[in-house]
Image: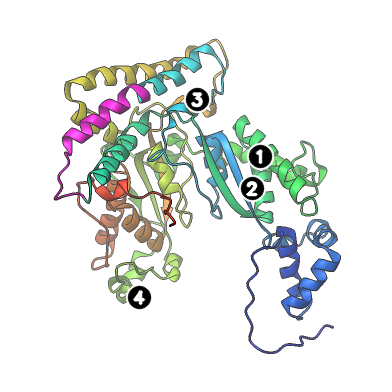
Amino acid sequence: MTKATDKTNKIVILHDLHPEDGAMLQALYSRSPAGVESHLDKVEKAGAGKFMSQYYVGYGHASIGDCGVTNIFIENYSMLARKAIQDNPLYSGQEASTRYLDFSEQPSFDPYNTPYTRSILDGWLTLYNTWMPKVEAAIAKAYPFDENSYKSEKAWKSAVQVRAFDTMRSYLPVGTTTLFSWTTNLRQARDRMMKLKSHPLPEVRQMAQDIFKQLVDKYPNSFSGQEMAEAAGRYADRDAYNQAEAKRENFESYAEIKARLQITDAEEKALLDGALIARTGQIDIDGLKRLETETLNNRPRGGVAPRRLAAYGQYNMACAIDFGSYRDLQRHRNGVAPLPLIEPTFGMFKWYTDELARLLGDDYAELEAATEALFTQIKELDNADFAVDPMLTQYLLPMGTTVICSLGYSVPQMLYVGELRSGKTVHPSLRPIAQNMLKQLATDLPGIALHGDMDEDSWNEKRGTQTITEKKVS
């Protein structure tokens, strides 16, 4: 038995370790109370390779893999591929923003690779490129520069440009490629790739294989190399189960949401008019009122609601939203927000059609007709002379497509999302949904402290200033 030799309080921060070395170093605590300096010597002399292959891969001590962290950069895959990586409560990372980047030159992924489907993708991008300058000019006219209202003319121009991107992003196809990153530990990387191995989209399955190959190359002692094999005996039962669940695990259709939440025809109409449908059968509202009133009513602005409140259950909700803004809801990983299957049923989300009609006036009729024509082309795929799959057709739809999504939120998560996403720096198609969450809480828990922004006006200069700028060093 090894005895610790140094009994004084100590904190050591290490930032330059190889992920496998870091994992071994932390794992040694479970077998030896010797200090980290002593363990460092052992790592340097023995190396992490044999240790990781023996105790992590060989004996299944999965928690050891939690201690080795890596950064993965993934470029020029579709938005659906990005969501597949991000659809994980432990995801951390960043992505290219349609608010600040001109996506007009980004290639788009055509899952069918036919002239007909390519014409649809090109059609959306043509509308994006053609109407972007017109929309930007219309926004500048609707919100003219006033030196008393803006910090500078530059700030005003930035706000106008960002609003134009916010509006015209609705025309970017979901198949548009993008760039994103993923900070993950080795265990989660392994587990996520093994899940994506059975994903219903071929692009995602191939991406998972490509990522895994590089992980094995970089960290050969942390993976057996067989995890992604097509007929891996050790993982055969797990693979079969994942394949059977793949479609429902990765996408939720409106028909499934409607059946699960028992949404009536009247509620469907209300959803499309902007309502939030909330089921409270799985949350103990009475218990919250009896036992947590002081906690809920006295929470200050910026205060985080105690995690224990999640034990009272969760709201099960549905809302209509564009796929572009759904992505912001999906980023809040303490809740459950299954990826909605993107379908052409309900067309372009109402906020975009209303905003474009307001900005463009009589000129909007031309854009509206072109938009409806492309949606019709997509619906007519059912008559195509090639096999059509609703999973693949998602790539052809624009980001502004209306989707019905379901949400499972505890009170702490609903407070957090409602307050954060009701702010004016949030995309204006999402703000009303966040505001409706706060209204639901106010109805169910009278007196609850709410610190959201309930103003209907969404124009704000700050949305144009949320960027990364290089500091000039003298």
Q: Earlier in the sequence, mark 2 or mark 1?
A: 2
Q: Is residue 274 visible?
A: no
Q: Quadrant of residue 272?
A: top left
- Residue at disc 4, secondary structure: helix
Q: Earlier in the sequence, mark 2 or mark 3?
A: 2
State how far apart marks 3 and 1 are (Cα): 21 Å
Q: Main secondary structure of the magenta part?
A: helix
Q: Position of residue 190 (x, y in %)?
A: 69, 50
Up the image or down, 372 lies above or below 292; here it is above
Q: Residue furthest front?
A: 474
Q: Residue 208's mark? A: 1
Amino acid marked by disc 2 = Arg
Q: Is residue 265 left or right of residue 387?
A: left
Q: Residue 262's mark? A: none
Q: Earlier in the sequence, mark 3 or mark 1?
A: 1
Q: Which residue is mark 4?
A: 291
Amino acid marked by disc 4 = Leu
* Label 4 Cα crowd, 10 Å radius (few <14 / some 14-19 / many 20+): few
Q: Residue furthest bottom?
A: 7
